Image (cartoon, grey):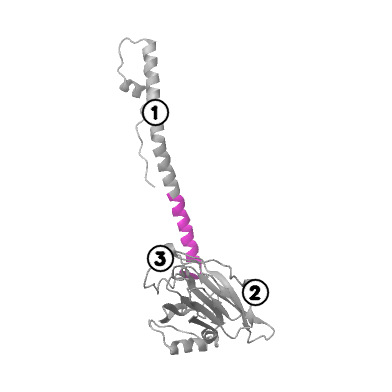
Amino acid sequence: MKKVKNIKRISFTQSFDELFEKPKLKTFESRKVKIWSLIAVAIVAFFASAPFLTVIVVTITTQSIINNSQKKIDKIKASQPYTEHDILKENLFLLHKPDYSNASPYTFKITSDKINFGNGFELNIKNSEGLNQYFKQDDFKIKAESGYSSMEQLAQYDFPNPNYKEMSSPISVFISGNLIESYEIQIDKAKGSWAKVYQLPDKWGVKTGYIINYNSPDSSYWPNHMRMIRYWIFSDGVGITVEDDANVTGTLTSDNKKSTTQEDLDVINKYSKGKLGELQENYEMTKIK
């Protein structure tokens, strides 16, 4: 904090005398006029400068609040056991910018074994025990967006539970008006944890692949855990995901390769006890002829 120097104060009388000449003979009335003139000038000057002073004060106060809030947010983030990443935005981009101003809403037709998106594509769902009617959103309205677009649950399908025959394992289908801009994951800070996008070749102009988010045995939040996300992104940026979890035995490592081979997916499938293979087998995006 800067030290404020002592400032020589000038009395109102001295200022007044310096502002007006002091004649040897002046009537009371003439002095009274000058006093009121000075007051009037002071009032006009104050109100003229008041808006600017208010703007300055408000600006400084607002900036101070923003700075303090950001420091608190940074402190909270630093204390979390994970970091947040826009993982698709860091790895993917659209070849052509969509015409968002003329984007039309999608129309959905959801059945027990497929979702028709109304854009010439449908997602086929295989090996499920059926559609959960409580989570069916075929009247949902969504279209391509230029910025952030929240992830919305479109449907939920029940699959057999390998451990408990009397129970089902629900898996949801999510949709976003701009998946690349909107999909965020939390990567564990523990040593050995990682996340990676495994891109597959585009098909019919649709981007597809997997996101693998792995927590190492050293994780304090959820050790030996893997989150697997399969995604499809249409040419206008609207994207679909299906997701599943697996507890992992052993330590899984990653490399910096940009390309994805079936061998890479087979290794992950082995560690996930077949869960990645189920995402690969149970969901198929097709183009309607």
Kind of element beneath mark 1: helix
Amino acid found under the numbered disc labelled 3: Asp
Looking at the image, residue 9 lies above or below residue 251: above
Classify residue 171 by image quadrant: bottom right
Say which amino acid is labelled 1: Val
The residue located at (34%, 32%) in the rendering is 8
Q: Is residue 81 magenta?
A: yes
Secondary structure, magenta segment, majority class: helix
> Which numbered tag is attached to residue 99?
3
Disc 2 crowd rating (10 Å Cα; few below 14, some 14-19, many 20+) is few
Mark 1 or mark 3, which has the lower sequence index?
1
Pinpoint residue 197: horizontal percent, then vertical percent: 44, 78
Residue pointed to by mark 1: 44
Task: For residue 109, say whether it is visible.
Answer: yes
* Mark toward the start of the polypeptide (3 vs 2): 3
Marker disc for residue 32:
none
| Residue 133 numbered tag | 2
Depth check, front residue: 124 or 21: 124
Q: Position of 207 compared to 23: left or right?
A: right
The residue range painted magenta reads 63-84
In magenta stretch: residue 126: no
| Whole-percent x, y for residue 58 in the image | 44, 44
Residue 248, image x and y in percent?
54, 84
- Name which residue lies at 39% across and 11% down: 29
Give the CA separation, mark 2 to mark 1: 71 Å
Mark 3 and mark 2 in contact? Answer it, CB < 8 Å. Answer: no
